[in-house]
Image: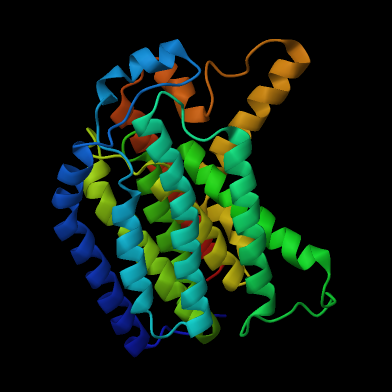
């Protein structure tokens, strides 16, 4: 059984969320104009067909994740029910993973390269994830599992894996206007609803609510047809924070339910690669999963709408199964 959320906690959560949304909506038009001068999307993928289908997106401002990051940092600073170490770690993860994504976006927008290489990006993620996992498992007030010994490598490797998995899952989902941001808002809102129910995780719930509204505020500018893309800057930052919050609440298993869209997108890529290696044929017309429907010429807004509905169903299941 869960407790009824404390009214004061809910009011403080609402205040942090209001500040986050206000900052994002006010700063949004200025950020769009600034990025449009230099940092615009260049449609280059490994599929010429996909490039043709997405040709209309060429020239859209990118690296809009800076807007999300600014909103989240402001909101996290106002989450007074979260322990200071939890807030500081969330801000550090937001900034560090966002910086890695920003470097990738900058290289792609200002050169002929497609961004950082897969190896460079993965090495950066591994380094940041290991550092975060070390802090998470050794910095109070994070508790140590009863069946784990201090110094046990699994204590660091598992959180690092969760962080890398979530940031890449969100990054893979970020391929259509509003798809990743909408699914993130839904997923984070579900986690916030669950975490706010108990005093032990109420502070983490506040931060999850901030993440949800930051994504929702950015969605105002990112919905179809998008005025701005968040790029890897936003995708890596939001994905890593999503994983971090689940780890801080010690309920990372909920990511498999609330984040079902992100999981499906990731599994579709893995299945595509394994199937092609085994049979020499493609399981999907193009991966991740949303691109399969793009290749079938289904209107973009309809694809996004269906994925959002799947996310909403998963969010409802998350709340109900923990109620």
Where is 96 relative to 231, above or below?
below
- Residue placed at 42% from the left, 85% from the top? 81
Which residue in the rendered view is the most extreme toward the front?
A: 111
Q: Nearer the viewer, residue 267 or 151?
A: 151
Residue 17 location, x and y as percent?
Answer: 29, 70
- Residue placed at 37% from the left, 60% from the top? 212
- Residue placed at 23% from the left, 71% from the top? 18
Q: Is residue 197 visible?
A: no
Q: Nearer the viewer, residue 205 or 168?
A: 168
Q: Nearer the viewer, residue 32 or 196?
A: 32
In-image side of 209 versus 269 (left or right): left
- Residue placed at 59% from the left, 34% from the top? 118
Question: Quarter holding the N terminus?
Answer: bottom right
The image quadrant of residue 27 is bottom left
Residue 318 location, x and y as percent?
Answer: 52, 60
The colour scheme used to paint the residues is: rainbow
Q: Is residue 41 visible?
A: yes
Residue 272 location, x and y as percent?
Answer: 64, 23
In-image side of 33 versus 136 (left or right): left
Label total for image: 0
Residue 218 location, x and y as percent?
Answer: 27, 51
The image quadrant of residue 232 is top left
């Amino acid at each position: 059984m869960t407790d009824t959320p404390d009214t004061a906690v809910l009011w403080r959560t609402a205040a942090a969320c209001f500040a986050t949304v206000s900052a994002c909506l006010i700063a949004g038009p200025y950020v769009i104009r600034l990025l449009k001068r230099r940092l615009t999307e260049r449609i280059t993928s490994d599929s010429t067909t996909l490039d043709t289908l997405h040709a209309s997106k060429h020239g859209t401002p990118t690296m809009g994740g800076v807007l999300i990051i600014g909103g989240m940092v402001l909101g996290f600073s106002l989450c007074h029910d979260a322990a200071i170490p939890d807030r500081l770690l969330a801000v550090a993860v937001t900034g560090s993973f966002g910086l890695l994504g920003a470097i990738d976006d900058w290289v792609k927008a200002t050169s002929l390269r497609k961004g950082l290489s897969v190896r460079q990006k993965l090495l950066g993620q591994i380094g940041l994830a290991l550092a975060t996992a070390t802090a998470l498992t050794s910095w109070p007030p994070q508790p140590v599992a009863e069946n784990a010994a201090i110094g046990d490598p699994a204590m660091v490797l598992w959180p690092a894996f969760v962080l890398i998995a979530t940031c890449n899952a969100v990054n893979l989902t970020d391929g259509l206007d509003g798809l990743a941001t909408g699914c993130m808002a839904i997923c984070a809102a579900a986690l916030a609803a669950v975490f706010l129910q108990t005093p032990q995780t109420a502070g983490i719930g506040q931060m999850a609510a901030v993440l949800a509204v930051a994504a929702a505020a950015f969605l105002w500018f990112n919905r179809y047809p998008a005025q701005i893309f968040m790029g890897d800057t936003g995708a890596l930052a939001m994905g890593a924070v999503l994983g971090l919050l689940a780890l801080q609440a010690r309920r990372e298993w909920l990511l498999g339910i609330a984040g079902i869209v992100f999981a499906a997108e990731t599994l579709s890529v893995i299945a595509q690669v394994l199937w092609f290696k085994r049979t020499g044929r493609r399981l999907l017309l193009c991966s991740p999963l949303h691109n399969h429907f793009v290749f079938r010429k289904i209107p973009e807004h309809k694809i996004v709408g269906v994925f959002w509905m799947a996310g909403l169903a998963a969010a409802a299941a998350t709340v109900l199964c923990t109620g």
